[in-house]
Image (spheres, rainbow, N blue to C red):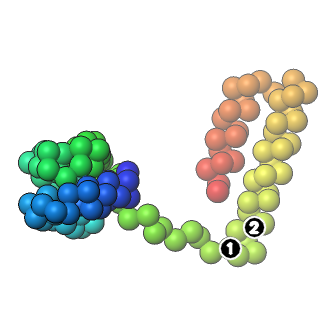
Amino acid sequence: MKKATQFFLVLGCIAHAIFIFPLIIGILAYKTVEKARSAKELTVGTCVCVFIFVSGIAGVLMLLMTDEDLKPKNAVAAPVTASNVKRDMDVYEKLTKLKQLLDDNIISQGVYDVQKAKYLAEL
């Protein structure tokens, strides 16, 4: 949602480029969205000004933005190692065998669900 908001802010600035006021508000709002780490940093006043003067869509998106939308998206995945691959394969084999036991009616759905959760927690 953050990138969509920034897109519509830029689009609104381009559309209203002949007017200086929307351009200034758009640039300030873009920087505010870029720096914000929580939704509380995006004040209602800023969102309403963006809605009125720059872009209605960007203003609404800013109002609807959550803390999750503002979190950095550059999380690094765990490195692939031989032990991680072996662990994942072990869990896969356990889940496959567990599913076969359920399909053969050897265990109940409840037992299957409990064991499945336990195996997935190992990942």
- Residue 120, position as x, y percentages in the image: 66, 48
- Name the mark on residue 80: 1
- Name the mark on residue 103: none
Q: Residue drawn at (35%, 58%), measured in percent from left and top?
A: 7
Q: Is 115 drawn above or below residue 6 in the view shown?
A: above
Mark 1: amino acid: Val
- Residue 33, position as x, y percentages in the image: 25, 61
Q: Quadrant of the C terminus?
A: bottom right
- Residue 90, position as x, y percentages in the image: 79, 57
**Marks 1 and 2: in contact by CB < 8 Å?**
yes
Q: Is residue 31 left or right of residue 114?
A: left
Quarter holding residue 25: bottom left
Pointer 1: residues within 10 angstroms few (<14), some, or many (20+)?
A: few
* In the image, farthest residue toward the right: 104
Secondary structure of the residue carrying tag 2 is helix
Between the residue at mark 2 and the residue at mark 1, the CA separation in whole angstroms equals 7 Å
Q: Residue drawn at (87%, 23%), measured in percent from left and top?
A: 105
Mark 2: amino acid: Val
- Residue 21, position as x, y percentages in the image: 8, 60
Q: Is 72 drawn above or below residue 99 in the view shown?
A: below
Quarter holding residue 41: bottom left
Q: Residue drawn at (24%, 49%), measured in percent from left and top?
A: 55
Q: Which residue is mark 2?
A: 85
Secondary structure of the residue carrying tag 1 is loop
Confirm whether residue 40 shows in the render: no
Q: Residue drawn at (62%, 75%), measured in percent from left and top?
A: 79
Pointer 2: residues within 10 angstroms few (<14), some, or many (20+)?
A: few
Quarter holding residue 20: bottom left
Q: Earlier in the sequence, mark 2 or mark 1?
A: 1
Front in this rendered view, residue 106 or 57: 57
